[in-house]
Image: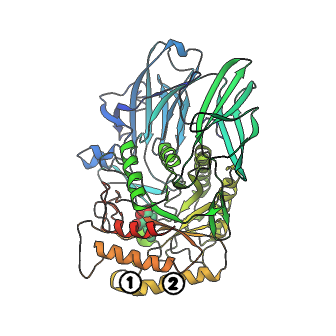
Amino acid sequence: MLNFSELYPCSNQARMAQLLDGMWKFRFDPEEKGLQEGWQHKLPDPISMPVPASFSDFFTTKEERDFCGDFWYETEVFIPREWEKQELEIRFGSITHRAGVYCNGSLTTTHEGGFLPVVARVTDHVKFGEINTFIVKANNELNEESLPCGATMVLSDGRKLARPYFDFFNYSGIQRSVWLVSKPGESIEDFIVDYELNGEDAIVHYQIITNGNHDVSFELYDEDKQQVAKSTGTKGSVTVSKAHLWNVGKAYLYQAVMRIWDGETLIDEYSSKIGIRTVKIAGKEIQINGKAVYLKGFGKHEDFEVIGRGFSWGVLKRDFECMKWIGANCFRTSHYPYAEEWYQFADEEGFLIIDEVPAVGMMRSTRNFADAGTGKFTRFFETPTVPNLLKNHLQAVEEMIVRDKNHPSVIAWSLFNEPETTSEESKEYFTKIFAAARTLDPQNRPMTGAFEKNSQPELCKCYQLCDFICLNRYYGWYIKGGPELVDAREAFLIEMNKWKDKNLNIPFVFTEFGTDTMAAEHKLPSIMWSQEYQNEYLDMNFEIFDQFEFVQGELVWNFADFQTTEGIMRVNGNKKGIFNRVRQPKSAAFVLKKRWESLD
Ligand SMILES: CCC[C@@H]1NC[C@@H](O)[C@H](O)[C@H]1C(=O)O
């Protein structure tokens, strides 16, 4: 049970949310002396730093771009006297990877995990009618106890360096929006909705979690702002007659308005858009509102030039326009929960999301892409760090599901990406993760995880935990690439027939397949890294997918080129994008558009 509310901020007659995005003060702390020098009160000689954004790509020196260790942020906020009777919180969409939050010099909260909200109650530390100072002490080191996994090395000049076990740059900072929230002492802390379809009608089961005992009301309004249902009590069900269902590519959102009353006096109010739909695995099908859906789309990253992993409404808008143009209907939040605004927009646009926790790098390798599929075994789940890793993994799963459970766009939870899954220890570990996750989702959405090639049907001990199976496969790239493409096809077919012979009668989704491709490279006949090869590779994969009826989705890796740690196999990042990093199409985008527009 979380000891803070993850509800997205909103303003109304009972509560206020003030956005604190902008230019903050900032300071690296390579000697880790900030605390003893009192930086929690004020940063000495600070520089400026945009929030939200990653700090790395603003700088022109390697020391700053690749900084690993402690770093600090500061901002000042005027807090009006009118808020004196309210409870005050400061809410960060995330702070990567861990943080302590200070208000006027007092520590108000700490948080482990860089991709879910950090919420601090600051009521007892603020000065009403005055300027208040908020300071964040953050750290971006990697280890095998926190998510995502990696290591931190020390260079000969004493600088720390992040060594990720994953294939994306270790961007860090306050990468999502920050809000100051003022709400009543008795407030709505969370809510739950679940749905039953009944002919043309729908039953909306709701629960409203408050921190008091006053009466509660629940109302539903349609898109014309007409009230369609109402009820009282913290838990109940309402029937929506002739309900407009939310569907993929055809979103319909109702407004749920929840209030706490003292007689006729309003105490608190919270409202949120909800979409009436059901998600179910039925045999080999993924069903939305009882109808099978074939997933077409991408593994993505929150990644862009200059701002790194920082949230941008502009990048979000361009990405959705590109995904609509190409005929996609789904994306996986690889390899971490994204900023809430991505889910809000997917709700609006009728996109499907596989929501993934940052459980990536659970195979000890700084070149997981090279080692995945080699059978390399690193006994990742047999080390003394596992108990702490499990604790942090369970926390991230809980925070992700509690935060995202009411989005109609979220249709499944991915609880890992490419860990070791062939040892008894990995089975024991993930059995605990899946069991815990299943207690957290009131809508009981399907649980899954993305398996890399070592997780072969005869070796893998964890696919049995999944409601549908996600495969990351690179036959024709990491395995038998280029001139061996014809053999890659044969090897792929052999594996797929092994899965078929298991007769699992559940859906499979390819959550990764792709090739690194330089947008400028053309070659006839093709070679690897050329656009022509990316197209030939995709055609071979589609020909295999289409042979197996249990394949119910194809999410290409990746939507766009993205930044990684530098190395001999990365050309200023991963180039497997169907779009380049600034979202212009490679020729494969037209191949996908043609295929996906022809698929129903
Ligand atoms: C064989 C593993 C492939 C690997 N999978 C995880 C992604 O985060 C990487 O980007 C991708 C790649 O190497 O392109």
Between 383 and 465, the residue placed more toward the observer is 465
Say which residue appears at 44% left-offset and 84% top-offset.
489
Q: Tell me residue 300's x, y (percent).
A: 43, 57
Between 118 and 554, the residue placed more toward the observer is 554
Q: Secondary structure at mark 2?
A: helix
Say which residue appears at 60% left-offset and 62% top-offset.
448
Q: Which residue is mark 2?
A: 493
Query: Which residue type carries mark 2?
Result: Leu
How far separated are the C-alphas under marks 2 and 1? Answer: 12 Å
Q: Quadrant of ligand 1?
A: bottom left
Query: Which residue type carries mark 1?
Result: Leu
Q: Which mark is residue 226?
A: none
Q: How many discs appear? A: 2
Q: Tell me residue 556's x, y (percent).
A: 44, 66
Residue 51 seen: yes
Q: Quadrant of residue 21?
A: top left
Question: Is ligand 1 within 8 Å of the beta carbon of the residue shown at mark 1?
Answer: no
Q: In this rendering, would 99 be left or right of 431?
A: left
| 250 to 287, vertically: above or below | above
Q: Report the coloring of the rendering.
A: rainbow
Q: Which mark is residue 485?
A: 1
